[in-house]
Image (cartoon, rainbow, N blue to C red):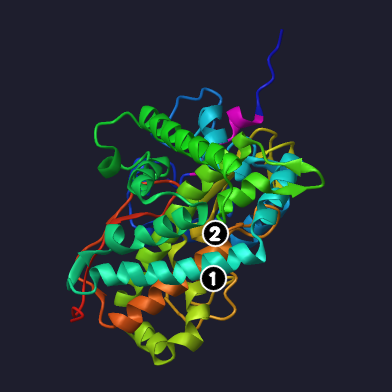
Amino acid sequence: MTTVAHPRDTRPYDPADISSRAFWSQTAAEREKTYAVLRAERPVSWHQPVEDMLMKDPNDQGFWAVVRHADLVEVTKRHEDFISGEGIVMESMPQELLDAGQGFIAMDPPRHTKIRRLLSSAFTPKQIRRIHDQIQGNARRIVDDIATRGEVDFVPEVAALVPMHNICDMMGIDEADRAKMAYESQFAGGWNDPELMGDQEPLDRLFQAMLYLGELAGRYIAERRRNPGEDLLSNLVQAEVDGERLTDDEIMSFFGLLTIAGNDTTRQSTSHAMKALTDFPEQKAWLMEDLDGRLKGAVEEMVRWATPIMTFRRTASRDCELNGQQITQGDKVVMFYASANWDTEVFDAPERFDLSRNPNPHVSFGGGGIHHCLGNQLARQQLAAIYRELLTRLPDIDVSGEPSYTVSTFFHGVNHLPVRFTPQR
């Protein structure tokens, strides 16, 4: 019997290294040098499996890297060719973790369509107003707590608290559960990070975190079914479209997504923006000349600059073609947002932090299509609120030492960022 070679077996790997721990341990600027070469010469290229997998996967032969803005947007919109249900991170993961931690963003139609519609229906105008007021209040609370101190570690004292308080308020989470919930959620995106993981085994620690978040969600969902309130979790429990409702597992999955992705993306954008405002003082000065008038547009550049989620994976559902490359059914196709947001075909001088950049078609919330980030307005509101408060009350706040960055193939994370400012008396 003759065996036919699979296309993956004979495909040469691209010489550019974007799979190793060494690559992902570099700074964003250093990684960009590799992306620039790929964008110019090999915009859709085949690479060996990412190093330090969470789990050994004998079927993982590698991945396609999609680094240009136009190609990334095309992949996003071709959701029938490039599906999400096999996982959204570069690494292979057990199915239980995919279900618990990636929620409806790792689903495909028709299930994705149903869940997204039900989730969207829970964000009523009344709920949106309530969330908006809470975001303003939490920004004040966070700055109140640091204002007299003169120097702090910006990540745990400011950036991490912005989404933690807001998401917990939205969901109606008690103060007593918040710190543990925020602590556990960070392991979901930091499985590659030696500082966070220490000597813990990543897969075990990840399961432990997801188990805790699942139990916490289950407790609150049961309580809301018995005794609904004004919060988003109560709305989700009661949400109904065409006679269909969300199951406990579906709400639990969304809870996991919100506590992980919702926390991390806003935290990272807030941190990277602080560093950029320090590195580009003329941009900070420009913004402060008309803070209310310029902040909305400035937030778009903060999010482009941060690109808090650096990669997103799809899987080819069938043999197809992308920018001249033949993609085989089952191939991993990884979109590199961090590269697309610096594509010189789309952005003039992308290496410049330019708060007046307009237009600014960044892909930090996705490239459009059915998976465009449901929480994009929430993220924008949070960034605007915390920076309005910081720059009004602590106008000379500046980074005062070297940041330390998370080692990750997914989140563009900052672990520590020392800042100083003139204390408020």
- Examine the image and state in which quarter residue 114 appears: top right
Q: Return the residue at label 2.
A: 39
Contact flag, marks 1 and 2 (Cβ < 8 Å): yes
- The answer to whether residue 10 is seen in the rendering is yes
> Mark 1 or mark 2: which comes first in sequence?
2
Picture coordinates of residue 40, whole percent (x, y): 55, 61
Q: Residue furthest front?
A: 227
Q: Residue furthest bottom?
A: 289
Q: Residues within 10 Å of mark 1 (few under 14, many from 20)?
A: some
Picture coordinates of residue 216, whole percent (x, y): 45, 38
Residue 114 position (above or below residue 346): above
- The answer to whether residue 88 is seen in the rendering is no
Residue 20 position (above or below residue 421): above
- Using the image, tell me which numbered label, if any, was put on residue 360: none
Instruction: Identify the residue at horizontal 66%, vertical 61% (top origin).
Output: 124
202 vs 108, left or right, is left
Q: Which residues are magenta?
A: 7-14
The amino acid at mark 1 is: Thr
The amino acid at mark 2 is: Arg
Q: Return the residue at label 1.
A: 344
Q: Residue furthest top?
A: 1
